[in-house]
């Protein structure tokens, strides 16, 4: 059974409130999203396994810790997930980055796939799937299914704002995937937008509306 991690550190809540404000422009919105992604990444990587290595400090030899085992991959769902990549890359600069392109059909709200490019060894990596919004859960579920069809077995999903409908759907369809989220909002409206939410994340990042 997957675990839903609510990453609601005061700094994250403060920054998210600024992002939600309709008066906040694209530049600030992008910077805050990147900062929150980095702060959430700190929590998401908390359980990465460590191993001992031998090093020599200027003073003496010592046994020190280093991250062991699998390497990481960051996979944003286009477009809005792009806004979370650089914050995570600051934490894990060696992570490879894949891209999954999905957009929601405005009438049906169903995700439509238009792009998929993943690192060649994606099945050997711990994958962090990122998208700021978890609304119906359709996009996240499709992206997770695509990753699994490429052999991924160790996937975490990171979103900024979600709602019970989307979280329930991801946990039901992908019980092996842990979810990291900064806020669980009330519900979806008639257009499948999150209430109160922050509006259309892609448009606010890229200034397209
Ligand atoms: C948004 C968001 C998610 C999706 C969430 O993308 O970034 O990918 O909607 O909705 P869901 O949980 O109901 O699937 P959108 O389709 O607006 O595309 P964009 O990022 O290109 O703007
Ligand atoms: N996509 C968004 O960008 N915002 C929502 O509230 C729902 C889907």
Image (spheres, rainbow, N blue to C red):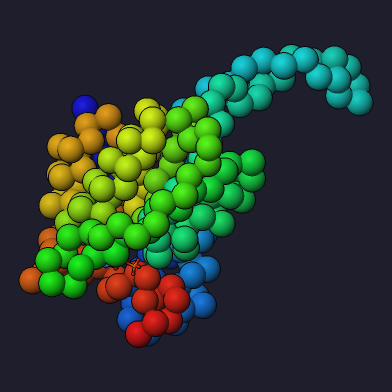
Q: Residue 14 is drawn in which quadrant?
A: bottom left
The location of residue 39, given as percent across then percent down, is 49, 50
Q: Residue furthest right?
A: 58
* Residue that appears at 77% across and 15% down: 54
Q: Is residue 141 left or right of residue 80?
A: left
- The mark total stands at 0
Q: Position of residue 187 (x, y in %)?
A: 13, 61
Q: Nearer the viewer, residue 173 or 163?
A: 173
Which image quarter holds the N terminus? Answer: top left
| In the depicted structure, whether residue 106 falls above or below residue 91 | below
Q: Quadrant of the C terminus?
A: bottom left
Q: Is residue 6 above or below residue 161?
A: above
The extreme left residue here reads: 190
Compared across the picture, whether 38 is left or right of 155 comes to right
At a point 41% along the width and 51% down the height, the residue shown is 116
Image quarter of residue 198: bottom left
Q: Nearer the viewer, residue 188 or 149?
A: 149
- Residue 126 visible in the current orientation: yes
The answer to which image quadrant residue 20 occupies is: bottom left
Quarter of the image where ligand 1 sits: bottom left
């Amino acid at each position: 059974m997957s675990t839903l991690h609510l990453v609601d550190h005061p700094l994250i809540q403060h920054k998210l409130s600024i992002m939600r404000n309709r008066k906040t422009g694209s530049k600030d919105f992008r910077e805050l999203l990147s900062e929150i992604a980095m702060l959430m990444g700190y929590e998401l990587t908390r359980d990465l396994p460590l191993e001992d290595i031998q090093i020599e400090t200027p003073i003496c030899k010592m046994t020190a810790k280093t991250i062991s085992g699998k390497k990481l991959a960051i996979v944003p769902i286009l477009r809005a997930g792009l806004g979370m990549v650089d914050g995570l890359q600051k934490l894990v600069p060696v992570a490879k980055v894949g891209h999954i392109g999905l957009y929601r059909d405005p009438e049906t709200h169903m995700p439509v796939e238009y792009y998929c490019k993943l690192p060649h060894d994606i099945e050997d990596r711990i994958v962090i799937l990122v998208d700021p919004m978890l609304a119906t859960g359709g996009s996240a579920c499709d992206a997770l299914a695509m990753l699994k069809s490429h052999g991924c077995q160790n996937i975490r999903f990171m979103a900024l704002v979600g709602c019970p409908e989307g979280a329930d759907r991801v946990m039901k369809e992908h019980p092996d995937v842990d979810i990291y989220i900064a806020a669980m909002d009330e519900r979806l409206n008639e257009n499948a937008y999150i209430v109160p939410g922050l509006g259309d994340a892609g448009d606010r990042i890229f200034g397209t509306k």
